[in-house]
Amino acid sequence: MWSGRAHRDGEIEGTVDVSIAEAGEFGLIARIVARLGSGPASLLGPGDDAALVAAPDGRTVASTDVLVEGRHFRRDWSSAADVGHRAAAANLADIAAMGAGPTALLVALCVPQDLDVAWAEDLAGGLSAEAGLVGAAVVGGDMSSSPTLTIAVTALGDLGGRPPVLRSGAQPGDIVALAGRTGYAAAGYTVLSRGFRTPKVLVEAYRRPAVPYAQGPAAARAGATSLIDVSDGLLQDLGHVATASVVGIDVRRDAFDVPDQMRDAASALGVDPHLWLLAGGDDHALAATFPPGAALPEGWREIGSVHEGTGVTVDRKPWQGGAGWDHFR
Amino acid sequence: MWSGRAHRDGEIEGTVDVSIAEAGEFGLIARIVARLGSGPASLLGPGDDAALVAAPDGRTVASTDVLVEGRHFRRDWSSAADVGHRAAAANLADIAAMGAGPTALLVALCVPQDLDVAWAEDLAGGLSAEAGLVGAAVVGGDMSSSPTLTIAVTALGDLGGRPPVLRSGAQPGDIVALAGRTGYAAAGYTVLSRGFRTPKVLVEAYRRPAVPYAQGPAAARAGATSLIDVSDGLLQDLGHVATASVVGIDVRRDAFDVPDQMRDAASALGVDPHLWLLAGGDDHALAATFPPGAALPEGWREIGSVHEGTGVTVDRKPWQGGAGWDHFR
């Protein structure tokens, strides 16, 4: 845990091009802590053996996600701030996907010795800014040198007295609904991997997902029977809901309009845009099921239905377009 | 966050010599989750977007520590279970050092593709067993492949209605006290680094610290004015207390008897054993200050005093034996 001495020594300069080896552990921590804010749930932030976070519900929602350079991000494709936004978003979305409101982040950062201190500072700025979107803050962390740049983030959240919305509650007859975008990040990734930098809307979506955080608690309040963060791809993540709920799920392809810029990019790159929309990950949309006849909260749209059976289909047929992302393949 | 499908597929075999590349992400997660237990605070464990942990106090204590292969552990010096014990202990000790009782761990695990699945399973077993010592459990985590074996652990805890015991509360006139051992892990590290495997008590102390977890809450109940986990070395960590509390701390060298096996090893290796006792880290003893005249709880012993001033001295003189551990040097 970040130590008290570090955030008190105050020797924070504006210098760039200082490597982490030169700044030292405590120097680096001081610079990073200076970039963090505070939130209403931050009862005690960095500087002691542990942080203290408000948990008014009497329960804490907690989730961990790790990003590894070369696997989850590339420094030539994303700025440090972008990586910070994305690392925070991946975790905060998991909290929202329980129907909870995020309260705090903790960050374990492993950095090569020759990394610029400015990169680590900007990463902290991105993490802090994304957390700030939902009133959360980075309350603690740890740091080590490592040959592999690695960012492990833990997010905490509060349910506000509501039960958590699990993956296992979908019932035959339920509506399947979506909040937020799908396909944008995957399209942006494909664009970047082919050496392009535009369309900007797609590339930016890959760099910094626009997560509909508030739609998690909104779905919970509206009676969602199941809820999940779309991180691996819509069909794969709905597959987790189908398995956990022991139901089948059908998605309507015509519920997905192809945005113009995605259509143009798909055409230029020779890709079926529905592959991005239905199987692309990393946008961190939220998918939920609601009882039949439920009034969907604003920001949610119907995309399919739950039936007795198993697995996920598109227009009642098996999907042939490829699956989501397994980080080991 | 570990997904629901993984812990439900049940395809857990007893096979060894399966690499992680062969087992795949979901296969590996299933095997790891099978090694985890549950605790009284585990309201919802692995399998959904996030875990749910009891926080009866209405606040959650949270701390993160990361272990990187080659920097914090070596696979030829420590078994996978040892590394699990140590990774958990480093975090659980931070919770105890706030005066809190640990409730849950979350683990981000980055593994090379050629790692044996059995290693990861045994790591999970060690993490779970160490957490079980304090009634906590591993409730969630994430996994990625990485060239560098990395284990980031977040521990959560509950204060049971007490205020946290910070580093900043020491007052001139206070007693400085210690619970647990110092020097053993550092001695074990030195023994291993010189190519030896004995004395076993030292080597084992390096592999698996014996942390006096219960002494954290006990110190809090007894009115400790400050409390810290000794992870970097006693003098360095008391330095954090001195800085945060704006006081000076003096440690009595004669409060530290040199155990026979440590004396023998020190003699054989040409090391001053007080370097281990006063500046060696990784045993995760707890150091605290108590008001003058306080009755120390069982398990605590007086080792020094707090005075007006700054910094840490040994027998009122500056320590010449070297400082603690900075992971960037």
Image: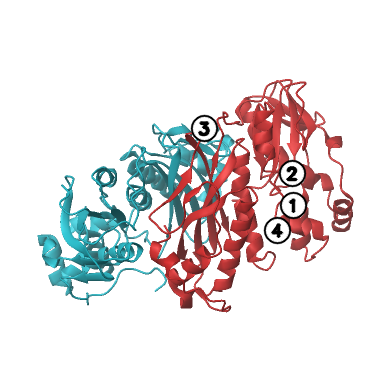
Chain colours: A red, B cyan
Tag 2 secondary structure: helix
Q: Which of marks 1 and 4 precedes in the sequence?
A: 1
Q: Residues within 10 Å of mark 1 (few under 14, many from 20)?
A: many
Q: Which residue is mark 3?
A: B10
Q: Which mark is residue A207?
A: 4
Q: Counting residues from the N terminus, which is met first, the one under dot 1 or under dot 2?
A: 1
Where does residue B238 sit, x and y in percent of width and height? Answer: 28, 63
| SS for callout 3 | loop
Asked if badges 1 and 2 are on one and the same chain, I answer yes
Give the Cα separation between the discs numbered 4 and 1: 10 Å
Q: Nearer the viewer, mark 4 or mark 1?
A: 4
Query: Looking at the picture, which amino acid does disc 2 mark?
Result: Ala
Residue nearer the viewer, B75 or A53: A53
Residue indicated by mark 1: A186
Q: Position of residue B10 (x, y in %)?
A: 51, 32
Labels 3 and 2 touching (C-beta < 8 A): no
Residues marked 2 and 4, same chain: yes
User: Which amino acid does the dot numbered 3 rest on?
Assistant: Gly
Q: Chain of mark 4?
A: A
Task: Sort mark 3 into few (<14), some (14-19) or many (20+) by Cα contacts within 10 Å.
Answer: few
SS category of the residue bearing label 1: helix
- Residue beneath label 2, please? A279
Q: Which kind of residue does numbered mark 1 sit on?
A: Ala
**CB-based contact (under 8 Å), mark 1 and mark 3:** no
Whole-percent x, y for residue B215 in the image? 25, 46
**Image position of A208 (left or right of B57):** right
Q: Confirm or deny contact between disc 1 and disc 2 (CB under 8 A).
A: yes
